[in-house]
Image (cartoon, rainbow, N blue to C red):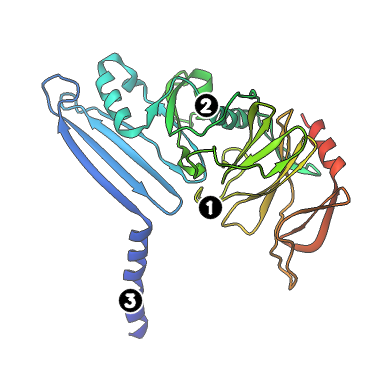
Amino acid sequence: MIKNLIALLIIPIFINQQLVAQQYTLDTIVKDFNNDKVIDTLINYYSSGSSCSGRTVSIINGKTKEKFELNNNGCFSTFTKRIRIPKNLTLKSNKFFLDTITEKLLPVKRDSMDASLKWLISAELNLKQLDSHALFNIIAKPKTNWQPSINIPKSYYVNIYGDTLQKLEPLNKGNSITKKGQGFLVYYTGGHNIKTLDNLVPVAQNKDYDIYKTDHAVFVKKGNSYRWVFISDANVTGSPEKHRWVSINQIKLIDHYLIIHQDTAPDNIYNIQIINIETQKVARLAFSSSHNNWTDEDGMDTFKITDNLLEFTQYDDPKLIKIPLNKIFDTLDELK
């Protein structure tokens, strides 16, 4: 009897927690969207959980009862969303429906990508997993140009087609959408948690470079030119579960190399990223760096550099790891 009573008390609490974690809104508009003198129905549904969210916009054609739908579902660990457009929604006869859904679902349109999005996409398309490598487990080789200025734009989207769409949003087996399709690449920039870069000051400098950081990104000034060299994103370099948690911690500049402490909350470990500013190679050390240990001893809060050695501790081992800097940099440059 007591067990049943406890269960009855627990169930409402659990349900209430689920409702708090999962929030949603639903709006319906009844209107003739395609001017055929028959009323259509638009359904605008938004849901948000603890780590992911998304909006689904659908229209039901009043005459044919055909349903068209797009969504921007995704997690808070990424800056981008990729949306394939179903073939029937690209037909000229359905242009009014596509335009209406796009207006409700997406931010403003741009004709081309800004420098930060170019870095993200280039890094993702030139990303390689390194199995059983002694030092690194991931390398990205983005290819971007130095810019005369740098900024973080407001959220926007660009159109993508064909091979680019297929690489960024591969078709699932059995998907009825054609391979040669159309889609949207959406860049949600709110996760950068900064509106202007004007007031930033360098976190590291030498005779060639000034290094700047935001909550999730690192860019470099060289003379009068700028370049993004790192952005925390789950599709590329790793990221916290939510972009409202800061990821860029310590940064060290050594000649034309950067060493970055990247936090990945809520994990107790952090990533150490190594970057060659000139070649743009970014590689992640294959160690579980952490200040927490399974032993009674605490580890180091972050890495340090002593006598040309990179030093840090791992989550499962209080023993100090020491790696010569020249070995790290030479290995990075040799990676293909």
| Kind of residue sitting beneath label 1 | Trp
Q: Residues within 10 Å of mark 2 (few under 14, many from 20)?
A: some
Q: Earlier in the sequence, mark 2 or mark 3?
A: 3
| Quadrant housing residue 119 | top right
The span from disc 1 to disc 3 (Cα, nearest Å) is 34 Å
Q: Earlier in the sequence, mark 1 or mark 3?
A: 3
User: What number is the disc on residue 317?
Assistant: none
Name the spot of residue 262 as percent of width and height, x first: 65, 48
Outermost residue on the top side: it is 92
Q: Secondary structure at mark 2?
A: loop
Alpha carbon distance from label 2 to label 3: 53 Å
**Which image quarter: residue 209?**
top right
Nearer to us: label 1 or label 3: 1
Q: Residue furthest bottom?
A: 2
Residue shown at the point (69%, 64%) measured from the top left: 292
Eyeballing the image, is 261 above or below 229?
below
Above or below, comparing residue 135 to residue 120 in the picture:
below
146 on left or right of 59:
right
Give the number of the disc on residue 114: 2
Q: Identify residue for label 3.
A: 9
* Disc 1 target residue: 245
Residues at marks 1 and 3 touching, judged by CB atoms closer than 8 Å: no
- In front of the other: 229 or 78: 229
Residue 176 visible in the picture? no
